[in-house]
Amino acid sequence: MKKIASVVFTLVFMSAGLWANEPVLTDETKALLKEAKAQVEPMEPQKLKTLMAENKIILLDVRDPDEWEKSTIDYDRQVKISRGFLEIKYPKLILDKYTKEDTFVVYCALEPRSVFAAQRLMQLGFKHVTYLQGGLKNFNP
């Protein structure tokens, strides 16, 4: 009985992060994220709203298709490109309409995917890339 209680407690404790939608990151991933954040500037939600109103940016939603169906930021200049396909699909989905000189704001649900995606875009030669600080959950239109 004690062993079953221990297993149940462990499962509940481990899945608590999933219920809160918080990613569980390893120490290695935390180090990579810290490095990426040192290379890419965050954008505060209020500044994003201002730039959207002025039509000065392109939004990149790097979440997965099932997340797009649930919610998205309503904005005409937006590209939905799942983080897992960014390096493969960016020429067709981004460069057919925009250039590497445009200003891009990358977002995901919380933040980590957008930070990594923004870093990768910079490595691919995009000049003006930032990410939405706190992710979509931190953005209220």
Image (cartoon, rainbow, N blue to C red):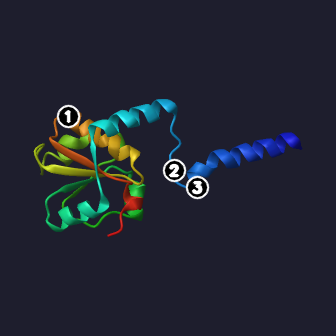
Residue 38 in the image, given as x and y percentages of width and height: 31, 37
What residue is drawn where x is 25% and y is 47%?
Answer: 130
Front residue of this view, candidates 77 and 28? 28
Q: Is residue 102 visible?
A: yes
The amino acid pointed to by label 2 is Glu
Q: CA distance from mark 2 to mark 1?
A: 28 Å
Front residue of this view, candidates 64 and 10? 10
Between discs 3 and 1, the one toward the N terminus = 3
Residue 43 left/right relative to 112: left
The amino acid pointed to by label 3 is Trp
| Residue annotated with mark 3 | 19
Marks 1 and 3: in contact by CB < 8 Å?
no
Q: Quadrant of residue 77?
A: bottom left
The amino acid pointed to by label 1 is Leu
Q: Tell me the crowding category of disc 3: few under 14, some 14 to 19, or many 20 or more residues within 10 angstroms, Cα based.
A: few
Residue 89 in the image, given as x and y percentages of width and height: 25, 42
| Residue annotated with mark 2 | 22
Give the vertical position of 141 relative to 21 (above or below): below
Residue 65 in the image, given as x and y percentages of width and height: 38, 54
Q: Is residue 85 visible?
A: no
Q: Tell me the crowding category of disc 2: few under 14, some 14 to 19, or many 20 or more residues within 10 angstroms, Cα based.
A: few
Q: Which numbered dot is residue 104?
A: none
Element at label 1 = loop
Q: CA distance from mark 3 to mark 2?
A: 8 Å
| Residue annotated with mark 1 | 124
Q: CA distance from mark 3 to mark 1?
A: 35 Å
Please state, as top left, top right, bottom left or bottom right, where the C terminus lies in the image: bottom left
What residue is drawn where x is 27% and y is 36%?
Answer: 39
Residue 3 in the image, given as x and y percentages of width and height: 84, 39
Between discs 2 and 1, the one toward the N terminus = 2
Give the vertical position of 66 relative to 99 (above or below): below
